[in-house]
Amino acid sequence: MNRTLRQYFDLVFGSVLLSLGISLFVTPNHINFGGVIGISQIFSHFINVFGILDRDVTGIVNFLINVPLFVLAYKIMDLNFCIKTLISILIQTVVLSLFPALTEPIVDDVLLNCIFGALVCGIGVGYGLRSSACCGGIDIPCMCLVKRHPDFKTGGISIAINAVLFSICLFLFDVKTTMYSIVFVFAMYAIADRFHYQNINIAALIFTDNKEMKQIIMDRTGRGVTFWNGYGAYTGKDKDILFCALNKYEIAQLKAIIHEADPKAFVTFFEGPSISGGFEKRL
């Protein structure tokens, strides 16, 4: 229950933060966000240019584009992921609609706005992903591909879509705006990646006297465990040495299991190892 509540808090917090970053830093400086939101910005631009509406409708257009993507997710992903993603999209639509973008930048320095915009939006996206969901847009088909093909590298899709999008921006706006947009997108995803626990692999090495520990971990986490017999040089006792690979957001659960099964177990965690060969990338 605590983990579920934390995930929903992360989802709401991340979605609101992402939307505020767009309103405060991205749109006032004519920076293109990239992805589906970037496409929505271009649509909103044309709607304003042709006088159809005189307000920013990025949030509404973003919601409409996300509808078919959400249908795709509903067919592939689990219900929990779909519900959280829908909540995130709705929050973004409401915040972007109720709190329209500033008409003037907070500061005159566009690069400074890029950095702070990338920081706020990147943290927002990262928290959204940390909740075992996403903030919609390109992340939806990327998550679906990872679900179907765990070893699939989704970065190529984002790069290809943004390359086309920024090429359009080059013709619609100017080189300077396009370059600032590229800087913003790269910085934002670099920051988001640091907050995205599912992207951070962890290797756990456990030394325990409890012979049932390995089975308990497998039953309660669904993760595989490799073990071998060891010998404590100081205690002179036989020990089981367990090795388990997991995602960073699963550490709390594993620690609780270990403490319950063997409070005196010695555990070391290694962050960021490269893992392949049957490792399940959980969302």
Image (cartoon, helix red, strand yellow):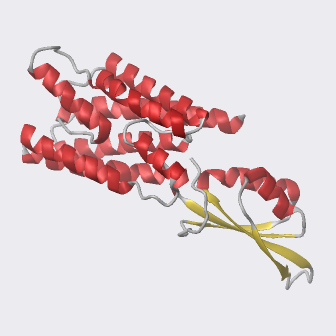
Quarter of the image for residue 207 reads: bottom right
* Number of numbered discs: 0
Quarter of the image for residue 35 reads: top left
Judged left or right of residue 108, residue 9 is right
Judged left or right of residue 51, residue 124 is right
Coordinates of residue 139 in the picture (x, y in percent): 41, 43
Q: Residue at x 57, y 32 (%)?
A: 9
Residue closer to the observer: 144 or 40: 144
Coordinates of residue 270 in the picture (x, y in percent): 61, 68
Judged left or right of residue 279, residue 137 is left
Q: Residue at x 33, y 18 (%)?
A: 97
Q: Residue at x 29, y 53 (%)?
A: 159
Coordinates of residue 49 in the picture (x, y in percent): 9, 22
In the rendered image, is residue 182 in sight? yes
Instruction: Indicate the quadrant containing the N terminus: top left, top right, bottom left or bottom right.
Output: top right
Q: Where is 143 relative to 135, above or below?
A: below
In the rendered image, is residue 184 in sight? no
Judged left or right of residue 187, residue 140 is right
Q: Where is 280 relative to 75, above or below?
A: below
Coordinates of residue 151 in the picture (x, y in percent): 49, 61
